[in-house]
Amino acid sequence: MRLAPLSVSAAEVTRFRTFGFVHLREVQDDVAPAITDAFEEVFAEVFAEVFENPSPAGREGGAGVSRIAERSEVLQEALLAEDRCPRLARRLLGTDVVYVGSAGVRHDGAVGWQREGGHRALRLIEIVQFLEPLSARTGALRIIPGTHRRGGSWDRFAAEMADPVRFLGMEPTEVPAFTIESAPGDLVAFDPYSYHASFGGAAGRRQITTTFASVPESDEARQELSDCLAADRSGLRDSARLSGF
């Protein structure tokens, strides 16, 4: 499988740094079918071995496999080769990066408003490929632009975002946000510290995420990276409630 290097424009880099995300359309069109097949092969193998059930899509809350990219030659080449997702991460973050891990997930139901981790010094980026076409009504990723910025006023709104009905008088689906409607050949790169959510999706919708971090430059950032790597080494996840993307 020979693939052209992934690249982003200067404008796309600026959009990522300004809003906390960028939508890269059709950059994986040529390998999307192979990625989907590889995803299914890994899930069948892992869940057949661990749970004696090769199809976990019906499990309430979803199911996931950590380090999925390392479990498939196709996924390694399409996602982890130096000119693929690592190149995007370096360009968008503007630094050398450390690979943190990957995950394949089948989602069931909504994912409420959240931001991942309390990483104050470490900068993370998640590069996601959704394996179904997704719209606002079918589980597309929603992000509140600009909420990736550390130390801003959004840092004081944790309670409001955790329970918008109580504190804002709004249903979670009514919270103003940008909805990233995507196709299987697209990639979405976002800072997981951004407030993000997903609503209305069908059971079993699939995604693959690769996560990278800026090379840490302080003791605090090095400790946060160590914590991230330790969490990723948890291996297989199969949860009644998968909390994030």
Image: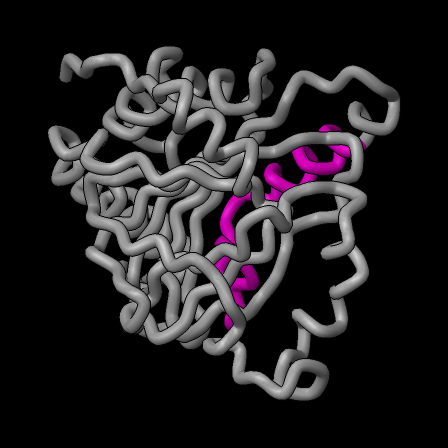
Quarter location, residue 17? top right
Image quarter (top left, top right, bottom left or bottom right) of the N terminus: top left
Looking at this view, is 83 or 48 the one in front?
A: 83
- Relative to 230, say whether 206 is above or below: below
Total of numbered circles in the picture? 0
123 part of magenta stretch:
no
Position in image of residue 202 (x %, y %):
28, 72
Magenta span includes 229:
yes
Image position, residue 224 (x, y; %): 77, 33
Residue appearing at x 25%, y 40% in the figure: 186
Q: How far across and how far down the image is residue 106, in percent?
A: 36, 59
* Residue placed most toward the observer, 74 or 160: 160
Residue sitting at x 40%, y 72% = 199
Left or right of 84, for residue 149: right
Please state if 116 lies on the left or on the right of 69 as rendered: right
Q: Based on the displayed image, in which of its 4 quarters is residue 70 positioned?
A: top left
Residue located 19% across and 35% down the image: 26
In this view, the residue farthest toward the right is 219
Decide if residue 68 is on the left or right side of residue 196.
left
State whether residue 81 is above or below residue 48.
above
- Please provide the residue range marked out in magenta: 224-245
Q: Is residue 150 visible?
A: yes
Residue 239 visible in the picture: no
In the depicted structure, whether residue 173 falls above or below residue 5 = below
Q: Is residue 148 left or right of residue 205?
A: right
Between 201 and 171, the one nearer to me in the picture: 171
In this picture, is 237 found above or below 15? Answer: below
Display colour scheme: one colour
For the point 56% across and 40% down, the residue is 191
Percent x, y for residue 6? Answer: 30, 19
